[in-house]
Image (cartoon, rainbow, N blue to C red):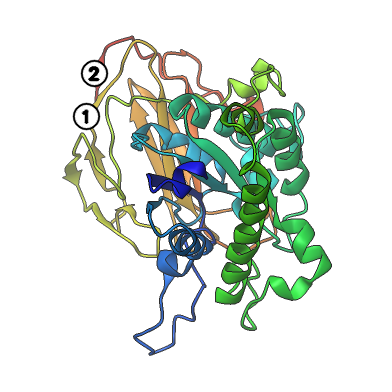
Amino acid sequence: MRRLATGATIKVMVLGGSFTAGIGCQPKKSKDKHLIRDKACAWSARFVHWLRVAFPRSTVVLDNLAQGGSPTPVILSGLGLFDYTNVDLILIDTLVNDQIGSEVRRFGFKYSDIDSTQAVSVAYEVLIRTLHELAPKAVLYSVLDGCPGCHLAVPAHRQVLNFYDVPRLDYVDVVAQLQTLWAYMGKKNTNHPDFRSHQAVADVLALTWCNVWSRISSLKSKDVGDIMAFSLKGYYHPAQYRERFHICKRPCSVLSARGTSTTQPQVITGNWSVYADRPGKPGWISTVPGSIMDIPLCFGKKPTLSLTYLRSYEKLGKAILTLNGKDLHLDGLRGDDTGQHFAQSFTIFSQADNPEMQGWSEGGLFGFDIKPNSSHT
């Protein structure tokens, strides 16, 4: 905040899901062209607007990378694609999408090994530590949303934040005292509150930062550094759980429907194209059964593969990923295990050099026996 006060340029990165991306902030059917929508309407944009007004000599750059249907493991899979150069502040808001712990637990865990809350906590710890490694000079700041159905994920996030002394806005407690601060326009989906909630989150953030500024403005620089220091006193969860998430920090091959790709597929049969058949959820989509495309891939010294695809309760099919002679079956239709109807991205993490290929019931090991520094299609 002292850099803001001195007129410096501050870069803010935002990570999260559809709520963080501002989905539902304004009604879709409104014909008012003057309404701000989506990310421009989200709480992060409103908070950054306050920063710009409060510190007019500074330049505050906002990069909201939030995307719909993205629990913590999905965000983990894309961390190596982002540019962390000169990032000063990373705002993390994944609670809404982490609330379905049974979905997070699918990411490579045996159901007998770990419960849903612990699975969310493990993924969140890996996210916090990886971000600190990729952007060691940036301040990590977490926002815990006040969504009514997020009770499962709240303790999972809090225990990690407390362990690493990560500053946060606990909006859960705020909404508990005044539930109208999580407002939505008569919709059944309370995960996407309207602009009133986004403004309330931004206001509470601004008030919190005002209080922090009042506290630190009289302190010496070295004391401020101690207050904001990231604690690396060890690990909260054992390695056997953390290592389920194989994070590629510098990917060799990237095929993305959202960002820059370093490889391009070749359609062999049928049709494949990139578009968003659901708002905010673009992807490589085929409408012809049996369609095939080849994707050239390269691997480094420690072969790792992550694959993100959409799962929903209707209008999605099945696919087979074939790599190095091994098949991985992907089912786009959700089962009845969550009891909720919504679309959410799902990521498979593969320690690709592992020769073993197992199913969910056997622990979710997805190995393709890939050799280091090799290429495959």
Direction bottom: furthest residue: 31
Asked if the residue under mark 1 is in contact with the one under mark 2, i.e. CB atoms within 8 Å, the reply is yes
Disc 2 is placed on an element classified as strand
Q: In the displayed structure, does residue 310 sit left or right of residue 235?
A: left
Indicate which disc residue 296 carries: 1
- Three-letter code, disc 1: Pro
At horizontal 24% and vertical 51% (from top left) the residue drawn is 272
Q: Quadrant of the C terminus?
A: top left
Q: In the displayed structure, does residue 20 sit left or right of residue 377?
A: right
349 shown above or below 276 = above
Determine if residue 96 is in view.
yes
- Position of residue 261 measured from the top left corner of the image (x, y, whole percent): 23, 39
Q: In the displayed structure, does residue 370 sit left or right of residue 202?
A: left
Indicate which disc residue 375 carries: 2
- Three-letter code, disc 2: Ser
- Position of residue 264 measured from the top left corner of the image (x, y, whole percent): 18, 39
Is tag 2's residue or tag 1's residue first in the polypeptide sequence?
Answer: 1
At horizontal 54% and vertical 61% (from top left) the residue drawn is 19
